[in-house]
């Protein structure tokens, strides 16, 4: 696949084949792709927990934001990758204080999207899961207080035959030229 083909093929998948596990070599390839991501001050704070154990997956997919968003579909995904930031890294804390930005959040977004794009190349479907209960996940997965749980990615083989229509904000409202609101030539 070309890079453009990967970008176009990637869609959020919410229908997984529960009987088809993700090969371990694919898990390694996805996490190696994440490790190639840039990180602020090269702090490399991204950590991933690959949850495949059925009982743990049931617990992980059963947490979430109460009745607001349950992401029930994720229970059929054979793999849940839990993205954590190991923020107890001095450089990360210092840079964040000086600039006033939580760099680890940017780092995790980049690393996790590397995972998603690599998964697409490997023929896997993914869906980001952002509605989580961090404290519940800490308890289930033994995540220490030095780390933040940022998001989960459900991974598996899609059973979907067609993708929903893609809706995107027009580029003219996304890309400005020289000034906020300016027209790019
Ligand atoms: C940080 C983040 C959190 C998300 N959380 C959820 C989620 O909890 N549940 C869900 O079904 N989709 C979630 N999504 C997927 C978005 O809904 C999806 O990317 C968006 O609707 C665009 O569709 P597409 O990914 O097919 O292009 C999340 C995406 C991102 C980037």
Image (cartoon, rainbow, N blue to C red):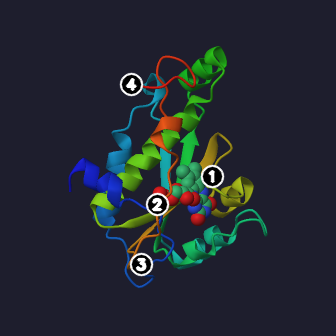
Q: Disc 4 and disc 3: Cα gap in Å? A: 39 Å
Residue ID at (65%, 47%): 144
First in residue order: circle 4 vs circle 1 = 1
Instruction: Find disc 4 in the rendering and name its residue.
Output: 185
Q: Name the residue nearer the viewer: 172 or 63.
A: 172
Between disc 1 and disc 2, the foreground one is 2
Q: CA distance from mark 1 to mark 3?
A: 33 Å
Residue 7: horizontal and vertical position, in percent? 34, 52
Say which residue label 2 marks.
166
Label 3: which secondary element: loop
Residue with the most extreme bottom position = 19
x and y percent of residue 150 in the render?
60, 48
Q: Is residue 14 left or right of residue 6?
A: right
Residue 154 in picture, x, y percent from top left: 50, 65
Neighbours of disc 3 within 10 Å: few (<14), some (14-19), many (20+): few
Classify mark 3 as within 8 Å of ligand 1 or not, answering yes or no: no
Tell which tag, 4 or 1, sits nearer the viewer.
Answer: 4
Between tags 4 and 2, which lies in front? 4
Crowdedness near tag 4: few (<14), some (14–19) or many (≥20) residues, C-alpha within 10 Å: few
> Which residue in the structure is indicated by mark 1?
143
Residue 160: mark: 3
């Amino acid at each position: 696949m070309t890079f453009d083909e990967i970008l176009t093929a990637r869609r959020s998948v919410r229908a997984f084949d529960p009987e088809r596990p993700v090969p371990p070599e694919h898990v390694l390839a996805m996490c190696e792709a994440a490790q190639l991501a840039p990180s602020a001050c090269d702090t490399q704070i991204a950590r991933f927990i690959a949850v495949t154990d059925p009982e743990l997956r049931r617990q992980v997919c059963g947490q979430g934001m109460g009745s607001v968003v349950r992401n029930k579909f994720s229970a059929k995904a054979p793999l849940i990758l839990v993205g954590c930031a190991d923020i107890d890294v001095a450089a990360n804390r210092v840079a964040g204080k000086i600039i006033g930005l939580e760099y680890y959040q940017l780092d995790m977004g980049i690393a996790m999207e590397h995972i998603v794009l690599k998964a697409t190349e490997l023929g896997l479907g993914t869906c980001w899961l952002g509605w989580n209960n961090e404290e519940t996940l800490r308890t289930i997965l033994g995540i220490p207080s030095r780390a933040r749980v940022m998001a989960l990615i459900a991974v598996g083989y899609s059973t979907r035959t067609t993708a929903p229509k893609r809706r995107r904000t027009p580029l003219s409202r996304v890309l400005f030229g020289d000034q906020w609101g300016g027209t790019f030539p």
